[in-house]
Amino acid sequence: MRIQLTLDSNQDDDGYLRGFIKYAFMEYTFVPEAKVSVGLMPYPWAAYIYNNVWPYLMMERGFFSYWNVYSTADFGASFLGSALNDHVFYQSAVFNGEGFKTPETEKHKEYVALAGVKLGNPDSVNGSLAGQYSYQSADEGVIKSVASGGGVLNIWKVKLGGEYQYATKTMHEGNFPEVDPKKYPEGFFAALKAKEGASKLLSEDQDVHYGGYAGYLVVSLHEKLDLVGRYDFYDPNFSSKYKNDGVSMWMSGLVFKLPAGVQAGIDYREYDFQAKNLDDDHNREMVPERVIYSHWKIPF
């Protein structure tokens, strides 16, 4: 039996650094090919991405979490298994469905299933492919499902990976059908709604499909230094009727591996918006945003 407690911190919009419990779960191994976990634990997709595809959560969360498609962790129970000498892995889980930062507010749960395969030779070229499907219904009749797919290829000192998210959410009559990931500038969707007009509001309850993709790159320059790169594209509505609403983000940076497990990172990133002009005045309001971040990971 194994018990894991993981603490984390982030900076809120008010500038304060706040700590929180990210994982707190118990894991019991029946046999090497079967494990059961209970508690506040990572989603199966989160565990796959951070353990295989994008190892530097300290630099930024994976696409699925950064763009708020779903949370990194939640309260629940899961079964993890493997077969064919660990070349095939699978996991099923039931979660509250509210995310680890939100208390449970309703009786409905989220059901998750993941399956994947490991490819190649661990000592040379290798990689893996995986897919996940989650389903959740809510008291208000809002149904949310997410289909996830991705993989990674490891060649020499290069790790190249990616993920794709196709999410579905039922939105009610009268809403503007754009799923806000809370990453756009304040007032963006209100301005877009005003520009599109009442004809683009939902005339009845309707499923809205949204999501996007990310590509990840990690290059080992030295045993103590990695180069990282990433490209994201998020679309708040895949429908061709709602165009020029997507946003892209690319980043490039370095991770320094210091003594005692400490890691320091720095990255430059740029956000660019498909919508260049929101009020037809021939002036570009949505200019690219450019930011430099520093990051630290200090184990204790």
Image: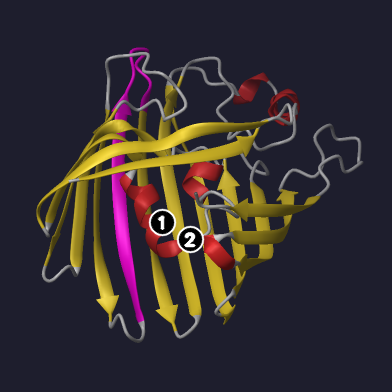
Of residue 246 and residue 251, the one placed in the foreground of this image is 251
| Horizontal side of residue 32 vs 158, given as left or right | left
Q: Is residue 134 part of the magenta span, yes or no?
A: yes
Q: Picture coordinates of residue 31 (x, y %)? A: 7, 56
| Residue 179 seen in the current view | no
Label 1: state its secondary structure.
helix
Residue at the image point whose x is 54% and y is 71% from the top: 218
Label 2: state its secondary structure.
loop
Q: Quadrant of residue 182?
A: top right
Mark 2 belongs to which amino acid?
A: Trp
Mark 1 belongs to which amino acid?
A: Ile
> Neighbour class for label 1 at 10 Å: few (<14), some, many (≥20)?
many
Pointers 2 and 1 in contact (C-beta within 8 Å): yes
- Return the residue at label 2: 54
Image position of 167 with respect to 50: above or below: above
Image position of 222 with respect to 185: above or below: below
Image position of 54 with respect to 126: above or below: above
| Horizontal side of residue 12 vs 117, given as left or right | right
